[in-house]
Amino acid sequence: MSNNYLFARRALPLAFLTLLACGGFSFAQTTGLPPLGLPPEGETANVPIGGLAGGAQSDLGSTIKNPAGTEGAHRGRMLYVKLNCADCHGYDGKGGMGPDLTDKKWIFGGTPAEIFKSIFQGRPEGMPSWGKALPKKDIWQLVAYIQSLGGSYPPQAEQASRQGDKPGELVAPELDFEQALDGSPPYPAHPFPNPSASQSNSGQKKQ
Amino acid sequence: MAKHVLLVAAAVAFFGSMPAFAQHTSTGNPPSPDSASSQSPAAAPKPSENVTGATASFAPKAKPGEWPRQARDYANTRYSPLDQITTTNVNRLRIAWTFSNGIPYGQEGAPLVIGDTMYLVTPFPDIAYALDLSKPGAPVKWTFNPAPSNIAAGKACCDPIIRGWVYADGKLIYNLLDDHTVAVDAKTGKEVWRIKMGNAENGETMTMSPFVVGDKVFVGNSGGELGKIGWMAALDVKTGKELWRAYSTGSDKLDKIGTDFKPYYKWMQGKDLGVKSWPPDMWKHGAGAAWGWISYDPQLNLIYYGTSNPSPRVPVQRPGYNLWTSSIFARDPDTGMAKWAYQFTPHDQWDYDGVNENVLIDLPIDGKTRHVLVHFDRNGYAYTIDRATGEVLVAAPFAHQTWTTGFDMKTGMPKVNPKEQPKPDQPLNVCPTDIGGKDWEPAAFSPKTGLLYVGILNVCMNVTDKVKTYIPGTPYDGMDMKRHPGPGKNWGAFIAWNPATGKAVWKIPEKFMVFSGALTTAGDVVFYGTVDGWFRAVDARSGKVLWSQKLSSGIIGDPIAYLGPDHREYVAVLAGVGGAAMVEKSQNGFPARGSTLYVFSIDGISPGSGAKLLTTSAGAPATPTPSAHEGRR
């Protein structure tokens, strides 16, 4: 068992080297993009896994912006096809073997940092772990492509992503009252806060 | 289409007067312009006539009321000798009882009935149930939860499904999605043995139903979409120990090909073709998974099974015939050694797996009874093949196809249409689509009419190939594809097929795909279900739809008939759309998923419903008491 496990873990990077040797594409090749300002090492580690509720709420790191920006999406698409992501999640991103990436429904969170972590770490039920096989900038480019499909959440909307809130939806006024009973901070007036506002996605006053 | 018909001219000349074409449209759709409807109508077969003179062995002779293996017999006929339900009374069929297993994945395969017990196994997480038919309401006798790994759920190409299980030696034997084969005691529901056959992490899964001959159980893998090398293995029914394993690609040694191996056609003869018909090393991830059905001929002592598409699905990456993918093997069940093989789709460029069932019948052709197998391939052709030698006797399209311009009976090779060969990054329209003119949904044979009955698909694809790299645990696929219905716009149909002439006798076009197995009965009623949830009973001779009922979800299971402990004939089928049938999900009217077994009887009568059943375990009438409502909420 353990031998098999080790082999499997090793197989991915090996396959990747083979792929490089075959000239499928090369990391050395210039992307025409300025070097990415990656978030400090460890910052993404603080991003909680999506879908945690209640007392486990955390803002740590969840507001990290995608350093690949929107320009990274083009190369992200190339990686998406080359690395067989498309064969699971669909060439249109609408799912297949793997989940739909366009429907605003995220098991493990839909903000850029959460999507980054899902790709980096892999997820149960089939999602491979790419953290050892891919440089971080490539993963951020994949995230940029997924963001371009329109199904993700902006960096500040980690809570909205978790609660299934959609842009433009109404918020019942009683939410503040009910959350006060629990001693939790008021619900944001807008589930999708303005990115230029406070880094925190809580504590906003209702208008 | 006319061209193909000419190729079987000899057979047609002999049986030319036999087939009848009575088109019955149950959906109000326009008739499809393919083979059946283009023929001139002839008289319907006489009430007692065996149209082809074909028979089958039905070994190993199960009790008439039982259903101990997926296709009921070794020959894979799916024929029930029960005749209480007839063309006259089938319109009184009503639901007798139901059972929900609660699993929201495709409900494929058939339940088994042995004695007073029905045995079901669910899609992932592969939970098994025994239902006591001798008690009102068929209560759960035992449950077995094998707890397979979650990783497997995401590595199955086409929904984490299972195509049922097999009963043998007091045990139920089945494959878990995470590549373990388990045997469960039929009486107690306790595990007897378990063997690890593969590694789900690398994209290998197991979905097929095991098949038992004597003291051996045969199991094969899935994972042809993820570049896993295909194999078939024999295990000891008593202990689960592996006795042999034969691969679908690679050297003759790996493929268990020896001096006894005699393929009928020259282009399949030679040494190590499982290596030589590939670019260097490509066979290692060339697939040929054995995820379909197995049949067995006790006289010849041969098992028959098909192999999946080659990987990657992009043909430009693997010039050559890619043996032995999209093929059939005939093997000695004792040694595993191959006796013959035949490749349905040489250098498969469209994902036309050869895994579909092989129905073994004895069929008069040109005045001589031939021991044949009938195979409806994904590639749209139905083959009638001499099962001793692998010689193709009849090859004719049963579904709309554009990938060939005909079939060369001399070489046994399809004439590939050069315009329908995909090139990387160039869009192309091809029929049938990847899931074929028919997928794994099994045909049935009736010894009373001598015909085969089968649900077919009428789906084409706009495909653009993308060159792929093998990365373990990810799809080795590369087909960017949009599917759409073929001519006539009906996504499916149900047909009766004459295996001697290679022609449909009648055809029922369906708006949605027909992705259920077929069931034939001695009452001359044939059953099938549609992806939008219609369960239908049809006159085996005329093709007239005699009865239909809409079930709670789409039907992709395989119907069975059995005798209850009350000596009443029941028909059972699972409803729960999923699997490859999900390719039609964007169609208006596509049903929600489901997980319900439906059991039907005449007038819905069973020991499980009626006034007298309102009794407690003490036998007294049930009366609610206040204490009944005091439980914790």
Image (cartoon, rainbow, N blue to C red):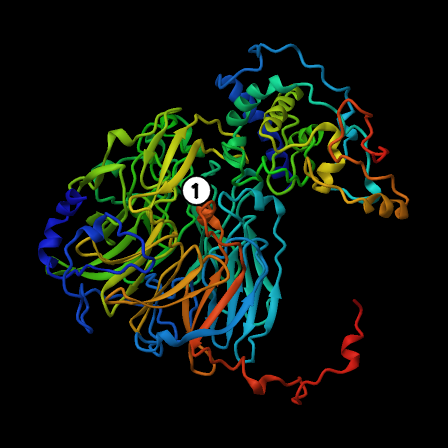
Q: Residue at x 53, y 45 (%)?
A: B198
Quadrant of the drawing holding the C terminus of chain A: top right
- Above or below, B207 against B448 in this view is above
Residue furthest out toward the left: B13
Q: Is residue B278 visible?
A: no
In the displayed image of the protein, which residue is found farthest to the bottom? Answer: B620
Is B32 in front, or is B501?
Answer: B32
Q: Which residue is denoted by mark 1 in the rendering?
A: B230
Q: Is residue B204 above or below residue B499?
A: above
Q: Is residue B426 left or right of residue A77?
A: left
Residue B613 found in image quarter: bottom right
Q: Residues within 10 Å of mark 1 (few under 14, many from 20)?
A: many
Q: How many marks?
A: 1
Give the letter of the chain under mark 1: B
Q: Point out residue A168 in the picture as x, y percentages from the top left corner.
A: 68, 36
Tell me what residue is drawn at x 12 percent, y 54 percent. B12
Q: Is residue A151 left or right of residue B6?
A: right
Q: Nearer the viewer, residue A63 or B76?
A: A63
In the rendered image, is residue A149 in sight? yes
Tell me the SS state at disc 1: loop
Residue beneath the point at 51% across and 32% down: A92
B323 lies left or right of B620: left
Q: Is residue A170 above or below residue B186?
A: above
Report x, y in % for residue B34: 23, 48
Where's residue B586, x and y in %? 47, 44
Q: Amino acid at mark 1?
A: Gly
The answer to which of B521 and A19 lies nearer the viewer is B521
Q: Nearer the viewer, residue B189 or A156?
A: A156
**Quadrant of the rendered image containing residue B137:** bottom right
- The quarter in which the N terminus of chain A is drawn is top right
